């Protein structure tokens, strides 16, 4: 694991604040202290979802690229892998926002700002820190690539199932097919697999903190989403977990 070599005041402050944010994010969302207001949890007013999501996913494509420019010309294979994984992740999400998802709501402006800043920061900093990378592609890198690929495919597949729910009728329906039969948000589980893959490729302490933030946030959101379905649909299947079939 790569840690900052120079623990100056700025580094200490930055890692302390981001570390606390990463650990608390899920709790802050769940207890509505810093609730992310979009989609099912939207307050009804704000940035149209497709526009907001496009900006918050496309900006990281740019920050990933800009912060990699200083070393990309002479990048090693491990550096290319980290860069490619982060770039592909946000490019795929941008594609899905434009051509796959079928949105019905809005994002609250404050939620929009928090997510824009967080994603641009995570993508840019992972890309910048990648100037320092592992020397060679090793077993952990291979596991990282496998997790990343499985994560992206599984995530895309479940996004398509969600989008197809609105082919014939607007509104919200009980998702069917794939891992939706066993879990409420399997797309979140696959998203986390992909980020675990990025963590194994990058191996920077900051990437670990970003992963912890996502793990907490997506766990809390899947928990709230299951409660939301149970309230809205009395026939919502009881056996469906939050995010990981049979486990959570
Ligand atoms: N890394 C992270 O921290 C993080 C955090 C959040 C999201 N993400 C990524 O973003 C992806 C999407 O997340 P999300 O929170 O926006 O997912 P989501 O709330 O499940 O929504 C995804 C799409 O499906 C639609 N949808 C959801 N449930 C539906 C239903 N029951 N019936 C019909 N349509 C439905 C939504 O429409 P509406 O917009 O109208 O609800 C939206 O277009 C995740 O899978 C993940 O890849 C990553």
Image (cartoon, helix red, strand yellow):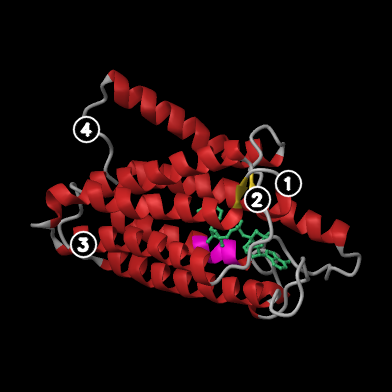
Relative image position of residue 147 (x, y in whole percent): 42, 68
Residue named by callout 1: 44
* Mark with earlier residue (3, 2): 3
Q: Calculate the distance from the C-alpha at mark 1 to the C-alpha at mark 3.
A: 41 Å
Q: Is residue 131 above or below residue 84?
A: above
Outermost residue toward the right in this view: 234
Please identify, in this view, whether the residue under mark 4 or under mark 1 is nearer the observer.
1
Please identify, in this view, whether the residue under mark 3 or under mark 2 is nearer the observer.
2
Q: Residue at x 26, y 34 (%)?
A: 4
Q: Is residue 108 above or below residue 101?
A: above
Please identify, in this view, whether the residue under mark 4 or under mark 3 is nearer the observer.
3
Q: Is residue 38 left or right of residue 72?
A: right
Secondary structure under the numbered disc 3 in the rendered image? helix
- State the mark number for residue 5: 4
Q: Calculate the distance from the C-alpha at mark 3 to the C-alpha at mark 2.
A: 36 Å
Q: Which residues are magenta?
A: 187-191
Do we see residue 168 in this rendering? yes
Corner quadrant of residue 50: bottom right
Please identify, in this view, whether the residue under mark 2 or under mark 4 is nearer the observer.
2
* Mark with earlier residue (1, 2): 1
Residue named by callout 3: 80
Labelled pair 1, 2 in contact (Cβ < 8 Å): yes
* Mark with earlier residue (1, 3): 1
Q: Calculate the distance from the C-alpha at mark 4 to the C-alpha at mark 3.
A: 23 Å
Q: Main secondary structure of the magenta part?
A: helix
* Mark with earlier residue (2, 4): 4
Please identify, in this view, whether the residue under mark 1 or under mark 3 is nearer the observer.
1
């Amino acid at each position: 694991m790569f840690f900052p070599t120079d623990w100056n005041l700025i580094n200490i402050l930055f890692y302390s604040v981001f570390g606390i944010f990463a650990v608390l994010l899920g709790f802050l969302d769940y207890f509505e202290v810093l609730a992310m207001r979009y989609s099912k949890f939207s307050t009804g007013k704000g940035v149209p979802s497709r526009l907001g999501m496009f900006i918050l996913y496309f900006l990281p494509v740019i920050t990933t690229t800009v912060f990699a420019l200083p070393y990309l010309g002479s990048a090693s294979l491990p550096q290319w892998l980290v860069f490619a994984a982060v770039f592909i992740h946000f490019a795929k999400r941008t594609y899905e926002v434009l051509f796959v998802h079928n949105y019905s709501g809005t994002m609250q402006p404050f939620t929009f700002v928090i997510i824009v800043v967080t994603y641009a920061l995570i993508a840019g900093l992972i890309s910048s820190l990648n100037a320092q990378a592992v020397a060679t592609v090793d077993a952990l890198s291979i596991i990282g690539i496998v997790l990343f690929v499985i994560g992206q495919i599984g995530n895309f597949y479940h996004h398509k199932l969600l989008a197809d729910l609105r082919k014939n009728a607007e509104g919200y329906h009980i998702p069917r097919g794939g891992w939706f039969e066993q879990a409420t948000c399997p797309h979140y589980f696959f998203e986390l697999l992909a980020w675990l893959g990025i963590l194994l490729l990058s191996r920077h302490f900051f990437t670990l903190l970003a992963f912890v933030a996502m793990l907490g946030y997506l766990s809390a959101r899947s928990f709230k989403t299951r409660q939301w379905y149970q309230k809205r649909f009395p026939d919502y299947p009881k056996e469906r977990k939050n995010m990981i079939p049979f486990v959570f």
